[in-house]
Image (tube, grey):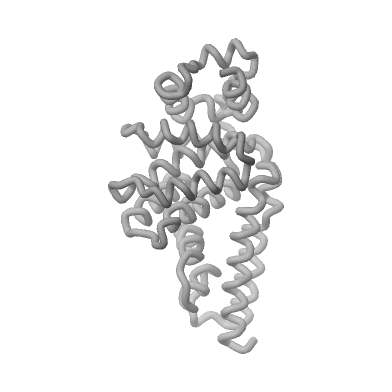
């Protein structure tokens, strides 16, 4: 029990408060080794969450906070189509193993198994907490991860798109940003234009300008504060933007 409580206490900052903290508390109290919030406090690793409403600094969100937010929202997306697909569960497990290593991923998935059984998660309240604490770049990365999870079974269903769109709205992600990230998960030249947030009627100059703007917005350096484990996902998104630009260049013979 000690190793698990130290894992949680050392990993979490603001996410141990608010609705995310309540969800974690539910899981701890019901499915994880009988561990309670009091156990964490006795371990001396529990942190008082940030209750302020001010705009967060770049390093307010730590890797563990992002991890807990991703676990909760992943559960919402996986259950969006009314079933729990083993391929999507495997994706979450494998993704966390690649990011955090086997030991930390094992702890995370233990929590996740409890979270996904909870039927009364308030998506809006969870997103409100995330929105208050995370930078815009971090929230964009969350949306990208959620689409990855939705496509783990081979395709993204309309119900999954609807849920991720609702989450994006709660996180104050613009429709342009949402459609751009969504288009990264579909093939075809029309989706390449959507990734760059432009119409096919855009001039070559406008295409180049859009590409530079997207590179600046989604550059992996904006997620340095989350730790190196999250940079791979940011780099993947970055490569998809480059791929879209190259497809348009090829089509136009730029």
Please count the marks in the image. Answer: 0
Q: Establish if 79 lies above or below 196.
A: above
Q: Closest to the observer: 178 or 53? A: 178
**Is residue 217 in view?**
no
Q: Residue 111: x percent and y percent?
A: 48, 31
Asked whether residue 165 appears in the rendered view, the answer is: yes
Q: Residue 22 or 85: which is nearer the viewer?
A: 85
Report the quarter where the C terminus lies. Answer: bottom right
Please give the name of the residue rendered at 65% of the width and 53% of the height, measured from the top-left corner: 232
Q: Residue at x 32, y 59 (%)?
A: 158
Q: Give the quadrant of residue 104.
A: top right
Q: Residue at x 51, y 65 (%)?
A: 184
Q: Quadrant of the N terminus?
A: top right
Q: Residue at x 47, y 30 (%)?
A: 20
**Camera-nearest residue between 231 and 193:** 231
Q: Position of residue 146 (x, y in %)?
A: 47, 51
Give the quarter of the image for residue 196.
Answer: bottom right
Question: Taking 237 as reference, is 89 left or right?
Answer: left
Give the residue furthest to the left. 82
Q: Is residue 123 above or below residue 44?
A: below
**Horizontal and vertical percent position of residue 245:** 60, 74
Residue located farthest toward the bottom when viewing the structure as drawn = 253
Image side of residue 194 versus residue 236, left or right: left
Is 53 on the left or on the right of 84, as rendered? right
């Amino acid at each position: 029990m000690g190793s698990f409580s130290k894992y949680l206490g050392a990993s979490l900052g603001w996410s141990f408060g608010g609705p995310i903290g309540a969800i974690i508390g539910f899981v701890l109290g019901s499915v994880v080794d009988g561990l309670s919030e009091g156990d964490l406090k006795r371990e001396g690793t529990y942190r008082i969450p940030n209750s302020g409403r001010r705009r967060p600094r770049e390093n307010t969100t730590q890797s563990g906070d992002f991890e807990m937010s991703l676990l909760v929202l992943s559960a919402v997306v996986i259950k969006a189509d009314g079933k729990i697909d083993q391929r999507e569960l495997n994706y979450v497990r494998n993704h966390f193993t690649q990011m955090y290593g086997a030991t930390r991923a094992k702890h995370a998935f233990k929590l996740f198994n409890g979270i996904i059984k909870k039927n009364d998660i308030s998506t809006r309240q969870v997103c409100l907490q995330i929105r208050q604490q995370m930078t815009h770049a971090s929230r964009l990365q969350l949306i990208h991860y959620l689409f990855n999870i939705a496509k783990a079974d081979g395709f993204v269903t309309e119900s999954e798109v609807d849920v991720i769109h609702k989450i994006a709205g709660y996180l104050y992600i613009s429709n342009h940003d949402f459609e751009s990230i969504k288009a990264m998960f579909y093939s075809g030249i029309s989706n390449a234009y959507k990734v760059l947030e432009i119409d096919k009627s855009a001039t070559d100059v406008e295409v180049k300008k859009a590409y530079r703007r997207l590179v600046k917005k989604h550059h992996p350096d904006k997620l340095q504060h989350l730790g190196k484990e999250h940079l791979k996902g940011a780099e993947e998104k970055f490569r998809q933007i480059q791929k879209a630009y190259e497809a348009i260049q090829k089509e136009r013979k730029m």
